[in-house]
Image: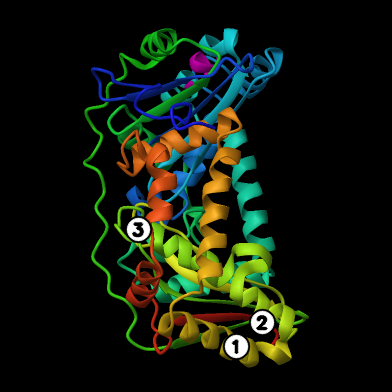
Amino acid sequence: MTNSSIPGPNNITRVELDNGIVVLVYENFAAQSVVIAGSLEAGSIYEDTAKGGTASMTAAALMRGTANRDFDVIHSSLEDIGADLDVGAGTHTTGFSGKALAEDLPVLLEILEDVLRNPVFPEQQVERLKGEILTGLQYRQQDTRFRAGRAFRENLYPENHPYHFSSRGTLETIPGITIDDMKAFHKKHYGPKGMVITVVGAVKAADAIAAVKAKLGDWQNADQPAKAVLPDIQQVDETRQIAVNIPGKTQSDIVMGVLGPSRFEPDYRAASLVNSVLGQFGMMGRIGDEVREKRGLAYYAYSSIEGGLGPGAWSVSAGVNPANVQQAIDSIVGEIKRIITEEVSDEDIDENKSYFTGHLPLQLESNEGIAGSILNMEAYQLGLDNLQKFKGEINALTKADLLKAIQKYWNPEAYVVAVAGPQ
């Protein structure tokens, strides 16, 4: 894949409609399909924490019935043209994605416009949805991995921070969410301000923009609030260990970590690369090699870095025999101490750079992958040349850059560790 064929300023068309919606189009006539992906500023960060899960339930209910189409009509209309459409909420945004034949793009956009603008939240469908969510949450109460993850986040982020809470809500909050709550959330937060939509596939940019403008160009919402701002947060200054007792389990799950960089931080790429060395590359990096392969202490062990709009977690996860919990934690801390005190090897940095730069063309093989990448460039203000600069920026990173990044975020004497499993 040549640099000029990678999505960039020379082949992405970006237009802002009069009502504020940003439309990004990438023409790709290799297949006769078209993909849409986008977001609105309507995530859980905007909800009342006492009604946690309102944003998620609202998004999930959009496809359950509108003023113009009931549940069956929405889904049969998509089925008739072999299309699909999904909507779901996260912490900052509600996202949507869909796929259809290029000739059916106007139909797909018409259904998208209807579910975004005209939902009616039918009582029977909302009750069914609430039941599904509560069943899922009850099931997760017995999931050691889920419970360790929740305990970790609740102790890494204070209660005044949106990341402290699950965007899905809890067994305590979901029953209290009413249809009126969902209608009020929709009325206030769904609108064109801050909305982004990408269109990728066998469609001319001018035609795609005209189609989006025809369906969404007249949308207005004077009630939409300003974009939410995250409160300031400090790294933990001591090690906090939390145990979640789930009787009858044969495995314990560990999640441990610190605050990592947001996607906006200049050292995000260096942090991502050193994280790959630590717990991603090959058989899950050094942590996988040491904790699982050499010592046999874990069924799985890896590290991850969230990035995102705010300081997401930089964490290590492992599934272990309950008898090996402390040994596994000590072994993980040992690998973190090693990587923050000495530069990675030439082989480590070269192999991981090759992996990162070699993975990019694979990511851009599908319209879905391209649409997601373009959406990220807009969401994180990375510039339309971000993908085209990617290889050069990765290859320019030095061992000193990697060491500096992990030293900035990780302190092996101060982190949060949550363990869920039997007593």
Q: Amino acid at mark 2?
A: Val
Name the residue nearer the viewer: 128 or 156.
156
Q: Name the residue tied to disc 2.
A: 291
Residue receiving disc 1: 331
Q: Is residue 111 magenta?
A: yes
Secondary element at image label 3: loop
Q: Earlier in the sequence, mark 1 or mark 3?
A: 3
Q: Are marks 1 and 2 in contact (CB under 8 Å)?
A: yes
Q: Amino acid under label 1?
A: Ser
* Vertical placement of residue 404 versus 332, above or below: above
The quadrant holding residue 409 is bottom left
Residue at horizontal 57%, vertical 14%? 29
Left or right position of 381 against 255? left
Mark seen at residue 352: none
403, above or below 102, in the image: below
**Element carrying mark 1:** helix
Colour mode of the rendering? rainbow
Instruction: Give the quadrant of the N terminus.
Output: top right
SS at mark 2?
helix
- Give the x, y percent position of residue 249: 75, 79
Q: Which residues are magenta?
A: 108-112
Q: Which residue is mark 3?
A: 262
- Above-or-below relation of 185 to 92: above
The image quarter containing residue 64 is top right
Number of numbered discs overlaid on the protein picture: 3
Question: Around disc 2, counting alpha carbons within 10 Å, would you say few (fewer than 14), some (14 to 19), or many (20 or more)?
Answer: many
Query: Could you say where residue 103 lies in the image, as x and y percent from the top left?
Result: 58, 7
